[in-house]
């Protein structure tokens, strides 16, 4: 079995794959204060007697990379591969500075292209809203990054004196007749409109018809309000991309007994 670890700014999302089947998924807090032993105990608790034969990490929090890699090594004798622009992958990164592309975005692009082998736009609706775009030649050409749903809601609460702290939820109207509904419409429906507009502009610049897919924790909520007909929503696209990456980089994975 392969352990995949997606280290984000808010959560560490982990997936255990048996072949292509996700058999277990769990989350940890992205807590920089925890040490290697504490993370090792958490992995042992979540996986029980299961011993992964390999592991791969995608991270946007560099301060946690070594801690998580060492905790997996200490617990299972497996040196996890850390995804970077230097990893072996089925797509070519053509942006001017490949090293600045987030690992989660690379994993999304890798998995999407592996599924469709044609131009794809991946809309990831999580802590941030990102577009990851691969053309028909298998080239990662870039995308966009915007504040995510929860980030917008928290920012309004923190940055203003009167706006309340509210949880993301469906909103039936575009015109809110109270503060809560006005915020929800602006954030939820506003994000949906931004997604629609930027997909249209991205297709114009891409100059080919892409497959359009969504992923991320808010994908099901936001796509309720988009005019775009998404080809599919993949809840675990990032973890699946990390799993695919492990296969590409398996010769580089030493396993220590």
Image (tube, helix red, strand yellow):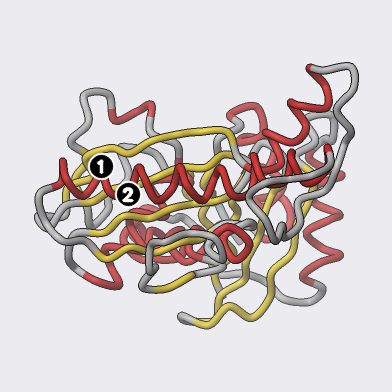
Identify the residue at image location x=74%, y=56%. Answer: 75
The C terminus lies in which quarter of the figure? bottom right
The N terminus lies in which quarter of the figure? bottom right
Quickly name the residue at label 1. 201
* Position of 118 relative to 8 (above/below): below
For residue 173, what is the image quadrant? bottom right
* Position of 220 relative to 137 (above/below): below
Quickly name the residue at label 2. 199
In depth, the one of 21 and 134 nearer the eye is 134
Q: Residues within 10 Å of mark 2 (few under 14, many from 20)?
A: some
Please provide percent x and percent y for residue 231.
Answer: 36, 73
For residue 47, what is the image quadrant? bottom right
Identify the residue at image location x=82%, y=73%. Answer: 48
Please provide percent x and percent y for residue 89.
Answer: 27, 53
Please provide percent x and percent y for residue 185.
Answer: 67, 46
In depth, the one of 81 and 201 nearer the eye is 201
In depth, the one of 181 and 237 nearer the eye is 181
Identify the residue at image location x=34%, y=56%. Answer: 249
Mark count: 2
Please provide percent x and percent y for residue 189.
Answer: 59, 49
Q: Are marks 2 and 1 in contact (CB under 8 Å)?
A: yes
Q: Secondary structure at mark 2?
A: helix
């Amino acid at each position: 079995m392969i352990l995949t670890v997606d280290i984000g700014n808010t959560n560490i999302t982990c997936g255990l794959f048996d072949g292509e089947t996700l058999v277990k998924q769990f989350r940890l807090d992205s807590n920089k204060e925890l040490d290697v032993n504490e993370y090792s105990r958490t992995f042992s608790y979540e996986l029980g007697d299961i011993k992964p034969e390999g592991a791969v990490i995608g991270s946007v929090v560099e301060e946690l990379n070594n801690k998580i890699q060492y905790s997996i090594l200490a617990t299972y004798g497996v040196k996890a591969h850390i995804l970077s622009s230097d990893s072996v992958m089925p797509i070519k990164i053509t942006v001017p500075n490949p090293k600045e592309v987030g690992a989660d975005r690379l994993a999304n692009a890798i998995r999407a292209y592996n599924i469709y082998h044609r131009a794809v736009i991946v809309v990831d609706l999580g802590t941030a809203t990102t577009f990851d775009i691969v053309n028909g030649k298998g080239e990662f050409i870039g995308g966009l990054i915007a504040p995510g749903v929860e980030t917008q809601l928290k920012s309004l609460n923190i940055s203003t004196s009167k706006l309340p702290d509210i949880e993301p939820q469906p909103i039936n109207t575009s015109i809110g007749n109270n503060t809560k509904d006005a915020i929800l419409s602006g954030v939820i429906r506003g994000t949906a409109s931004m997604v629609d507009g930027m997909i249209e502009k991205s297709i114009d610049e891409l100059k080919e018809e892409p497959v359009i897919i969504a992923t991320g924790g808010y994908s099901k909520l936001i796509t309720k309000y988009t005019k775009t007909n998404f080809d599919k929503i993949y809840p675990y696209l990032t973890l699946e991309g990390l799993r695919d990456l492990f296969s590409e980089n398996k010769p580089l994975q030493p396993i220590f007994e």
